[in-house]
Image (tube, rainbow, N blue to C red):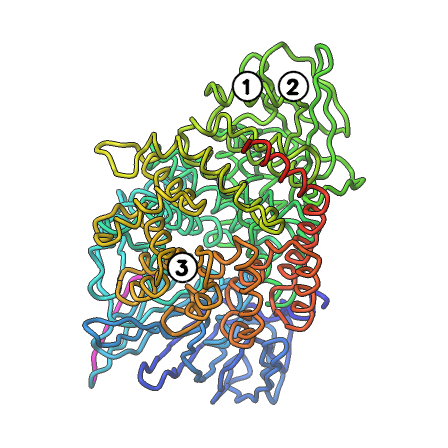
Amino acid sequence: MPLHSVRLTNTCIPERYELTLEPDLRSYTFRGSVRIAYRLTKASKTLVLHASGLTIDRVSVRSAVGELAGTHRFSPKSETVTLTFPRALPKGSGTLQIVFSGPIQEKMRGLYRSTYRVDGVEKVLAVTQFESTFARQVFPCFDEPDKKAVFEITLVVDASLSAISNTQEVSSTVSEGTRTVTFAPTPRMSTYLVACVVGELEYLEGRSKRGVVTRVYTPIGKKQQAAFALDTAVRCLDFYEEYFRIPYPLTKVDHIAIPDFAAGAMENWGAITYRETALLYDPQHSSLQNKQRVALVIAHELAHQWFGNLVTMEWWTDLWLNEGFANYIEYVALNHLFPEWEMWTQFVEVDAGEALRLDALQSTHPIQVEVAHPSEINEIFDAVSYAKGASVIRMLTAYLGERDFRRGLTAYLKAHAYGNAKTKDLWAALSASSGKPVATLMRHFTLRGGYPVITAERHRGDLRLSQERFLASGERVNERPWVVPLTTRGTNAREHLMSARTDTLSLKKGVINLNADASGFFRVAYDEGLMSELSAAAGAGTLTPAERVRLVDDAFALAASGRVPIAHALQLSSFIRADTDFSVLRTFVVAVRKLKPFVEAEREEGLIDAFMRDTLGPQLARVGLHARKGESYTDVLTRGLVAFALQDARDATVTSDLQSLYPHVETVPPDLRLAVYAAVGREPGGLETLMARHKEVELHEEKNRILAALSSLPHGTARVLEFALSTAVRVQDTRVAFAGASRTLHAAREALGVLEKHWPTIIDRYGTSGHDLPRFIHTLDVLNTTEDARKVKEFLSAHKAPGAKMAAAQCLETVRMHVAWRKNHGPELVSFLKEYAA
């Protein structure tokens, strides 16, 4: 579909909205009115706005020709409404008034309802979720990111309920049990950032150094879980004001925990909404991993208050300007606020690792990708826009230097404040601050999909380099070379911009690592001698944790592509046994676990289990199964990781020890509970025990831990997924179980049957909102036989997946790739494991 076909023209420019909404939480409907001050660039008898699923009762306009009543006609395909007037509206200013009504939905978009219980009594919230194109489902508007305007919002609610919007309350009047709340005008902003929340809530409050009021709102009875979020939010806001050198422009910022929420959070200006697990932290029952997640999400959403809200991408093609930057800056903030967490190592493992995996497929897409229809917009909220975007910004920062990067960033934000920008505007600002050709470097990583693998071979005193596109399938393609910033440390410390297909460096003797601190978005294939030296350096601790993560991840990726023998990757276990970094260990554990389906298909899965037990046994011996006073955060995380992996690898002693902790599971450290639950699930009647526990517990995080344990079990997958689709599990959390089912062949095959059976329900719940539908499809990625590939193709062909076409293509490509790898390299893997076991 041509891009212009669904975009509004610039004939009518909105300047101010006066929006009144009156939600009825008994009938699940709302009434509303909107007055839109506009400017026409030429005379017209018609105005076209966005509107979807609304009933319009009355339309009128006041302009230089007086007041006119209008008629309306909806166009469902383009989600617009055309207003027609008896005479042409003149060029210049006017005011449009529309009275309308609509439903408060169950689906988590537009204006929807969310519920929770207090002492058995159900409480109902009305919540908005407008990104990317759902404001039009609540009020007629110009629902595109560059159609910025000022919003004056009024909420008419039951007098007993809280009412929250983007800005501070300026008046509140009560009449006959109804409260009318008016909020201060917002800055100029996009429609997708408008927010309204109505319901029974409580809060904790703090203030930033400049006096910005920060509140964390929770459902009734949970505000004690808001303390960590409040402290983090206040400190993070102070940090960003100093980092960006631009004050936060509002007088308040609210962080609101919503029981039912499709995304992790939403950066509405001044009224940020979150799912509970992304905002609330219970010191007794929440894990350290969840504490880190809460801090990351808060930092991400607060970064958006500048990158996304103050300056917004002009169109969704540049979504990454919002998400990639927020994804990067959140780590900058947490590295400052919690340096002991070593978050940059986790970034290399989680964010860069995920981006490198997705971007190694033929079916990837560029960071900057043309989108037209709303369903296409939702598709690009993926690891390319977020994680690859953040990764290339990290690479660019290392190339420019922190000082010049920040100077350029501030200049960019000031130049485009309260307006919109394109990627080229950012490159211009960073080039001006650094004097370096930013656009020349970055166009290779934003305008094309994929990334290079650098092959490094020592030849006498030189290092011979070559580059080509890395594809997970191992296919060789002839593409133009990238411009790649190579950075080395130690005796060979230097920076080198590689732009040709081949290159030569003259280096001194010593260990050579071409990706210092793993800052570059590329992989490196070292010759056998160089790899041996790097492995030894990793064991000696002379590589940083981030470099060790990248060494492990690259080795397994190169082996999976058939570029190097699988033995090269598995032999890294020699230093893994004694490595003390959590991210390094998790990278190795996840990589080895992904090999299990290949030996499972050959009925040799016990070989992987034995390898895992041998490698990780020393790690559990080091950290122990029980917490120790004063231990490091990385030991806490390692204990949970290794204990789960060992019970999953059928270590009888570890499994028994974990099962013995279950009777007092509430006193077990939260980071160990997933392993305890998974071990209990292996007992006779374990499924029933865990399902009963899921219904008993109140903490949202604990419920998800149990779901994850259930879906990890070697039996009962279909039953677990049926449970996850039932009313016992919140709609937003079903995906937790399906993610677990993607770990083994038998589970993924059972998942395919459940997907076929329940596809209409899944489409109804997730097909046109949020970004969950692709995650259900990716449950099947692990499959690896010819018969699997046939069934996946038939399933994807027979079942429509709106907003998930790219995910479907990526899934089928991955399965076919696994079929080929199993045929070509499966025997090599089994042979290595047999020899290792002997």
Q: Quadrant of the C terminus?
A: top right
Callout 3 touching callout 2 (CB < 8 Å): no
Kindly identify which residue carries mark 3. 710
Q: Could you tell me which residue is drawn at 40 percent across and 59 percent down?
A: 710
> Magenta residues, as a range?
167-175
Q: Residue furthest front?
A: 838
The amino acid sitting under disc 2 is Gly
Q: At numbered mark 1, what does the secondary structure look like: helix, strand or loop?
A: loop
Using a 10 Å C-alpha cutoff, classify the residue at mark 3 as few (fewer than 14 neighbours), some (14 to 19) or many (20 or more): many
Q: Residue furthest right?
A: 478
Q: Quadrant of the N terminus?
A: bottom right
Residue 586 x, y percent position in the rendering: 46, 39
Q: Could you tell me which residue is drawn at 31 percent across and 47 percent down?
A: 658
Which quadrant holds residue 804? bottom right
Left or right for 732, reference 511? left
Using a 10 Å C-alpha cutoff, classify the residue at mark 2 as few (fewer than 14 neighbours), some (14 to 19) or many (20 or more): few
Q: Could you tell me which residue is drawn at 25 percent across and 79 percent down?
A: 158
Does 820 sit above or below residue 620? below
In three-dimensional space, the C-alpha distance between marks 1 and 2, rounded to whole angstroms, equals 18 Å
Residue 170 x, y percent position in the rendering: 27, 66
**Which mark identifies residue 489?**
1
Which is nearer the N-term, disc 3 or disc 1?
1
Q: Nearer the viewer, residue 492 or 426?
A: 492
**Does the segment drawn in magenta span residue 433?**
no
